[in-house]
Image (tube, rainbow, N blue to C red):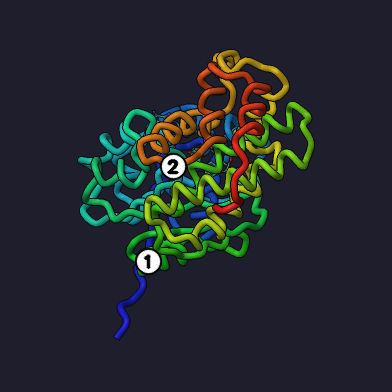
């Protein structure tokens, strides 16, 4: 007899930025009690007052009931947790959550990045800091503002425990938000983290007005780099052809709505990366992921020339025209993946 599917009555969303707020709305639309944790009391008060999240989702009304809190313990008691703070903050949040989270609680990783200090994927950080959690990840083409407005999209929810992935997908599904379940957690994470690096590169090509042919060529060769990286980690090749790979790559590498692509455009137009970061530009996860992905690729002997140049550009040691020149002058080779 098949075991009954797990149901999640309460969903705790950790991180009240754009994506956390959008996912809280998804949870509420799916008929769950959504508890949104944020560290910023003003944002929490605004959500509770029914005036939405003007800082991260300006102009978007919250029609569904979302209960926001600054009390991490309150959110941590939920049946299912979504972790939605930036990748570089995950470890610190998990340390705060460790004494608060019950054994066996499913934790869905929603950040797209690799930890800069350690080279760990988000699921590896989770295993180290919150071993009592059952891991999952949510990724795919999904701009927070689109999702918050109720525009349709589809995403991947992956967990090594397929029944858990099915249950989370079921628990978060709405008429406009269609999660597909998968078991290749690592493949889903890699696609989500590395597409941000490519989006910076694609944006730089666009900003420098090098033409749509150049953009398409760069995305295709960048996709080959992601495939090599994934293969080396024994991820399923099919995963990259799905929503969390190709789907998100297409979205992020072609839309000015993407913060990573927009960051790249500014670089292509001639802005210095140090100035962009100093002016407090919107979160561009790829700027943190590029150097660590480059370092991992070197250690694992994976050829990732586009990731290399993006890393050097964000580190300020390579100019865009020199980067293009370096890529174009590489020895000719067979077009294998
Ligand atoms: N915005 C989007 O469309 C999507 C974003 N994501 C991913 O979700 C993650 C979060 O992105 P967004 O919500 O868009 O970023 P955001 O910049 O809109 O919000 C980040 C939130 O995290 C909070 N935060 C930052 N540092 C923190 C810390 N140390 N402790 C606690 N809270 C902290 C901020 O106060 C803010 O509420 C990123 O990894 C991003 O790649 C994934 C899919 C879509
Ligand atoms: O991951 C995203 C869409 O799926 C959001 O992309 P940006 O972080 O580049 O805005």
Vertical arrangement, residue 4 with respect to residue 293, above or below: below
Which part of the image, by quadrant, shows the N terminus? bottom left
At mark 2, the secondary structure is loop
In the rendered image, which quarter is residue 209 located in?
top right
Instruction: From the viewer's perspective, tell me whether residue 95 is left or right of residue 180.
Output: left
| Tag 1–tag 2 contact (CB < 8 Å) | no
Residue 7: x and y, percent? Answer: 37, 66
Residue 329: x and y, percent? Answer: 64, 31
Vertical arrangement, residue 30 with respect to residue 314, above or below: below
In the rendered image, which quarter is residue 135 located in?
bottom left
Give the residue number, with chain letter if any, for mark 1.
7
At mark 1, the secondary structure is loop
Residue 164: x and y, percent? Answer: 35, 64
Task: Decide if residue 283 is in sight here.
Answer: no
Q: Nearer the viewer, mark 1 or mark 2?
A: 2
Residue 205: x and y, percent? Answer: 70, 32
Give the residue number, with chain letter if any, for mark 2.
302
Task: Decide if residue 101 is in sight here.
Answer: yes
Front residue of 61 and 242:
242
Numbered label attached to residue 210:
none
| Residue at the image position 42 percent from the left and 45 percent from the top | 13
Q: Residues within 10 Å of mark 1 (few under 14, many from 20)?
A: some
Front residue of 91 and 273:
273
């Amino acid at each position: 007899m098949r075991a009954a599917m797990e149901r999640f009555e309460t969903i705790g969303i950790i991180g009240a930025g754009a994506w956390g707020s959008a996912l809280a709305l998804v949870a509420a639309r799916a008929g769950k009690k959504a508890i949104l944790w944020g560290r910023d009391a003003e944002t929490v008060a605004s959500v509770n007052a029914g005036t939405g999240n003007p800082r991260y989702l300006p102009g978007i009304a919250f029609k569904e009931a979302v209960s926001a809190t600054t009390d991490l313990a309150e959110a941590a008691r939920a049946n299912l947790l979504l972790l939605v703070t930036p990748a570089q903050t995950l470890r610190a949040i998990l340390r705060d959550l460790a004494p608060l989270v019950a054994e066996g609680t499913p934790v869905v990783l929603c950040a797209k990045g690799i930890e800069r200090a350690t080279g760990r994927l988000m699921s590896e950080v989770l295993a180290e800091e919150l071993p009592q959690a059952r891991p999952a990840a949510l990724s795919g083409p999904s701009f927070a503002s689109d999702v918050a407005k109720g525009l349709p999209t589809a995403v991947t929810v992956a967990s090594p425990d397929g029944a858990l992935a099915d249950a989370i997908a079921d628990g978060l599904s709405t008429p406009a938000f269609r999660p597909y379940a998968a078991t290749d957690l690592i493949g889903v994470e890699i696609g989500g983290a590395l597409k941000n690096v490519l989006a910076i590169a694609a944006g730089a090509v666009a900003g420098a007005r090098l033409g749509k042919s150049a953009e398409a060529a760069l995305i295709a060769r960048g996709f080959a780099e992601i495939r090599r990286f994934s293969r080396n980690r024994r991820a399923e090749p099919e995963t990259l052809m799905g929503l969390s790979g190709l789907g998100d790559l297409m979205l992020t590498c072609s839309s000015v709505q993407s913060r990573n692509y927009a960051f790249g455009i500014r670089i292509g137009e001639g802005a210095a990366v140090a100035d962009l970061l100093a002016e407090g530009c919107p979160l561009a996860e790829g700027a943190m992921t590029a150097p660590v992905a480059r370092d991992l690729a070197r250690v694992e002997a994976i050829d990732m020339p586009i990731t290399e140049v993006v890393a050097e550009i964000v580190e300020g040691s390579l100019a865009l025209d020199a980067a293009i020149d370096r890529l174009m002058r590489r020895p000719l080779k067979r077009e294998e993946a």
